[in-house]
Structure formats: C-alpha cells, structure tokens
C-alpha cells in the first residue's frame, strides 16, 4: 500500500519548522482584530495552533494527514492545551464543521497550493466561505510565482540538510524540485536517509508532493467567485507592499454575505 507523502514528512517536519516563528506575530495580530473562534486549515503538527491557543483564543485545526495530527495532538498535550479541537479532513470537504462558525480562517505557508488543480482550489474556498461568519477574515500565505522565483526553485537532486536525531542517529535529506510552468505546478521529491551510527546502515523514506501555484489576479478571481472581497495583498509578514521581489503573497480577504458563488464551475 502506498504511503501518503505527508505522513512521511510528518515524522521529520518539526526538525525544520518547529522554531519557525516569522509569521506568528502576524496571525496573533489578526486574531486580536477578528476575535475567535479561529480555524487553521493545513495545521500540520500544530506550529500555529500552540501560540494562538496559548494566547487564549478558541482555535480548531484541520489537516488531511493522520500522522501530522498525531504530532499536533502530542504537542498540544505537552503544552496543556487539550481544549484545541483537531479534525482530519481535506480542505475541499469541511463537512464536519458547521456553517458560519469562525471569525478567522488561516491557511499558512503554501497550504492552499497543495490542492491539485483550480477546481479543487475553488471548492476549498467555497468551503472556507461556508464555515466563516459574515465579515470573517481569510488569510492565505502563498508563493509569489515570479519568473525569478520559479527559476530559483528548480533544483536537481542535491543534499538539502542534516539533523541529529534524539536516538543518536543522523538524518540527511536530499531534494529535487521541478517546475512545470504550463500546468503551474512545482513537484518536489524528498529523500530522508536515517543513518544508524553503530552499523552505518541507511533507512530511506521518500515523499513526493506537488504544489499548484496561482498568480495574483487568478487568486483574486478565485476568491471573488467564492464570495470573498480581497482587502489587501501584502508581500511580507511585516505587511510590506507586494512587489516583484516579494517571495510570497499574504492575502487578506473578507467573507461577503450577499453573493452568488460559482464554486463548482
């Protein structure tokens, strides 16, 4: 049976991202503005759930990967934040969540781009519109796919990092990345090699995933069709203006109440 790529990545995700906090203050500021409850879709191992819950907000997390959610559950338990609800679901089907529940929805660090095509992205936005309250905010953090950015992402197979694991073994990661511009896709393959220090044996796990990137005005149209009004698109977590040099687009959109949506087209 094929192993889900995200379940493979989950075992090693926190080695790289556990201490990534560049966006935390931004989401806390928007949480203060919007109020709760808050939904994070693609919550992974709980990197953002913990600071939001620790700040006193009611927050729920959704992820499609059981392994990611198990890591998140353990992290939340260690922090004593057992009130955080976790749901296993794909963002195109949030049927476990009631209509009009949330004041803020967050899809951080390219989570939205893991959806495979435009139709799936449109369905996901329709679901996010459904579970948000009227006037609620949606925050999307996605790659800004300029030609320079896409060229920089192209990468033949190469060493991509090393970590010392708690059991004394070493983990080496190798990565390859290709851009398919016609289909607006970026395919990444990760090789995780765990090296036993006593025997020198190597245990390899492989994960391949694809991002379907979107351009600025395409994303604005998707949001409009789903019933959102784009408030702003920033180029950094410090809310700098979006420029040709911005590596990412941080989109702030408001859920409109009176709108005809086109989610299934």
Image (tube, grey):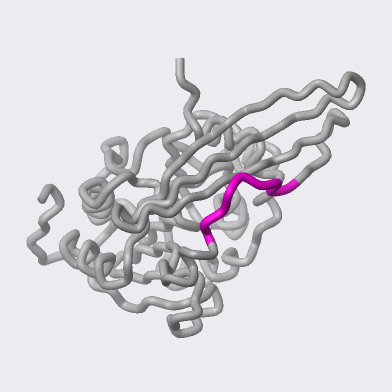
Residue 9 in the image: x percent, y percent? 58, 37
Q: Going by the picture, which residue comes out furthest to the left?
A: 260
User: Is 124 on the left or on the right of 41, as rendered?
Assistant: left
Image quadrant occupied by the N terminus:
top left
| Quadrant of res 200 | top right
Per the rendered image, the range of residues in magenta is 153-161
User: Is 93 on the left or on the right of 241, as rendered?
Assistant: left
Q: Is residue 36 above or below residue 175?
A: below
| Count of labels in the image | 0
Residue 237 in the image: x percent, y percent? 54, 73
| Quadrant of res 225 | bottom left
Q: Residue at x 35, y 58 (%)?
A: 181
Q: Residue at x 27, y 51 (%)?
A: 121
Q: Residue at x 28, y 42 (%)?
A: 92
Residue 82 drawn in magenta: no
Q: Is residue 130 above or below residue 232?
A: above
Q: Nearer the viewer, residue 182 or 82?
A: 182
Q: Is residue 176 above or below residue 225?
A: above
User: Is 69 on the left or on the right of 257, as rendered?
Assistant: right
Residue 33 in the image: x percent, y percent? 44, 73
Q: Nearer the viewer, residue 128 or 169?
A: 169
- Asked if residue 131 can be seen in this view, the reply is no
Q: Going by the picture, which residue comes out furthest to the top?
A: 1
Q: Nearer the viewer, residue 219 or 125?
A: 219
Residue 202 in the image: x percent, y percent? 76, 24
- Asked if residue 238 can be seen in this view, the reply is yes
Q: Residue at x 33, y 62 (%)?
A: 214
Please identify the dominant SS of the magenta region.
strand
| Quadrant of res 89 | top left
Q: Nearer the viewer, residue 82 or 49?
A: 49
Q: Going by the picture, which residue comes out furthest to the front?
A: 156
């Amino acid at each position: 049976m094929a192993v889900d790529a995200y379940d493979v990545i989950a075992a090693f995700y926190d080695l790289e991202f556990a201490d990534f906090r560049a966006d935390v203050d931004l989401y806390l500021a928007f949480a203060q503005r919007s109020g709760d409850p808050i939904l994070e879709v693609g919550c992974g191992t709980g990197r953002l759930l913990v600071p939001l819950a620790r700040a006193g907000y009611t927050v729920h997390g959704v992820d499609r990967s059981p392994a990611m959610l198990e890591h998140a559950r353990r992290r939340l338990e260690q922090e004593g934040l057992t009130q955080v609800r976790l749901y296993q679901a794909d963002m195109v089907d949030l049927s476990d969540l009631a209509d009009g529940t949330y004041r803020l929805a967050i899809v951080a660090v390219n989570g939205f781009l893991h959806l495979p095509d435009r139709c799936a992205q449109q369905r996901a936005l329709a679901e996010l519109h459904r579970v948000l309250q009227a006037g609620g905010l949606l925050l999307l953090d996605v790659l800004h796919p300029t030609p320079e950015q896409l060229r920089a992402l192209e990468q033949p197979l190469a060493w991509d990092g090393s970590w010392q694991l708690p059991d004394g073994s070493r983990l080496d990661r190798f990565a390859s990345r290709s851009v398919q511009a016609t289909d607006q896709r970026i395919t990444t393959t990760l090789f995780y090699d765990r090296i036993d220090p006593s025997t020198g044996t190597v245990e390899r796990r492989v994960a391949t995933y694809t991002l379907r990137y979107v351009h600025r005005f395409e994303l604005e149209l998707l949001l409009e069709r789903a019933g959102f009004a784009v408030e702003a698109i920033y180029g950094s977590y410090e809310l700098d203006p979006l420029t040709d040099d911005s590596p990412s687009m941080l989109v702030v959109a408001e859920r409109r109440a009176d709108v005809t949506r086109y989610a299934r087209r």
